[in-house]
Image (cartoon, helix red, strand yellow):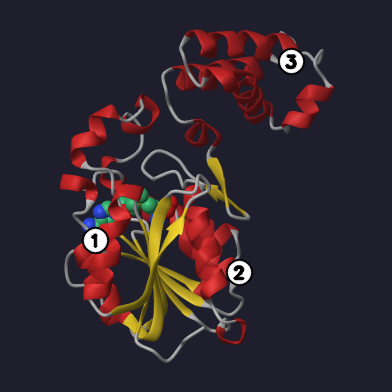
Amino acid sequence: MRVLEACTNAAALLKSKKVQPENVMLEAQLLLGRALGVDRAYLIGHPEACLAEAVEMRFMAYVERRSKGEPIAYILGKKAFWTLELQVGPGVFIPRPDTECLIEAILSRLEPRKRKALAVLDLCTGSGAMLLSLLSELQGAFGVGLDVSSGALAFALANARTMGLLSRALFVRADIRGPLPFLPRRFDVVVSNPPYIPAEELSSLPRDILGFEPRLALDGGDGGLRLYPGLIGQAASLLASGGLLALECASAQAGCLVEWASASGGEDVCTVKDYGGMPRGILARFGKEMNS
Ligand SMILES: C[S@@+](CC[C@H](N)C(=O)[O-])C[C@H]1O[C@@H](n2cnc3c(N)ncnc32)[C@H](O)[C@@H]1O
């Protein structure tokens, strides 16, 4: 089979299975690129190239997985986030573009002269998306990522290694609801994108999310707010004076978080908007020293 024919057939199959109908050709090309070990540009430039049987079989297997709803990021084994390409796969949450808005907001709040040697704590780190993005921008900063899932932490560690950030990142398995492991210092920045989908809405999630991404990464309990009071409490005690807390949430939850952060001593509390202009998180200062 040739490249164009293979992609056209796969796109038609994905469309018939109602998998992202508007993106099927792009997805077919990405999957063939993975099977062949080339990028999309090569496939577009070589529509008549013949595929070896082994490549064809690998490609068909990928298309079949996708046609059953598996997220394309899991099949490709990677997801672009911020300026990074993160390794992902079954067992870890796939980072979402909206979380990048929080990274942008955090960086804009950090005073340039204090960016060096900042200590960053990422509670619920998953693939390490937030922590590694911040460390990649904050030269000389050091960070700790906590997650209760050892599967997720394996990805975070692999990502830190690939990005050359292993010497500045430490990943520890911990349940943020319990006493945390000993952390030798206070942090200048605490970030978290915890599970926040209301339990009552889980069953209405698309099948490529609900059927494949870890429930632990999605289920936020009643109203989706289960972890936030504990998170805010932990952050308030772990932040250095003037430290910055950044929490991601759903838009309907932002008002609640603003209230809780203020009640816990947070100052300059504000919401962060996502690319659609909806509230997607909050920022708060704890203490006064590090005003920007
Ligand atoms: C929505 S994912 C976010 C992952 C990552 N921060 C990101 O933005 O891509 C939430 C993460 O919280 C972790 N998690 C859920 N409950 C936890 C708990 N009680 N303690 C620590 N981590 C938890 C999950 O394993 C998952 O990796």
* Residue 272, x across and y down, in percent: 45, 60
CA separation in Å, label 2 and label 1: 27 Å
Q: Earlier in the sequence, mark 2 or mark 3?
A: 3
Residue 277, compared with residue 138, is above or below; it is above
Residue pointed to by mark 1: 228
Q: In the picture shown, does residue 13 fall above or below 62? A: above
Residue 3 is tagged as 3
Q: Which quadrant would residue 42 be assigned to in this image?
A: top right
Q: Residues within 10 Å of mark 3 (few under 14, many from 20)?
A: many
Residue 292 appears left or right of 235:
right
Q: Position of residue 36 (x, y in %)?
A: 69, 26
Q: What amino acid type should be assigned to the residue bearing mark 2?
A: Glu
Residue 120: quarter of image: bottom left
Q: Position of residue 149 (x, y in %)?
A: 30, 53
Ligand 1 image position (quadrant): bottom left
The residue depicted at 80 percent of the width and 16 percent of the height is: 47
In front: mark 2 or mark 1?
Answer: 1
Q: Earlier in the sequence, mark 3 or mark 1?
A: 3
Task: Give the labeled residue for mark 2.
Answer: 137
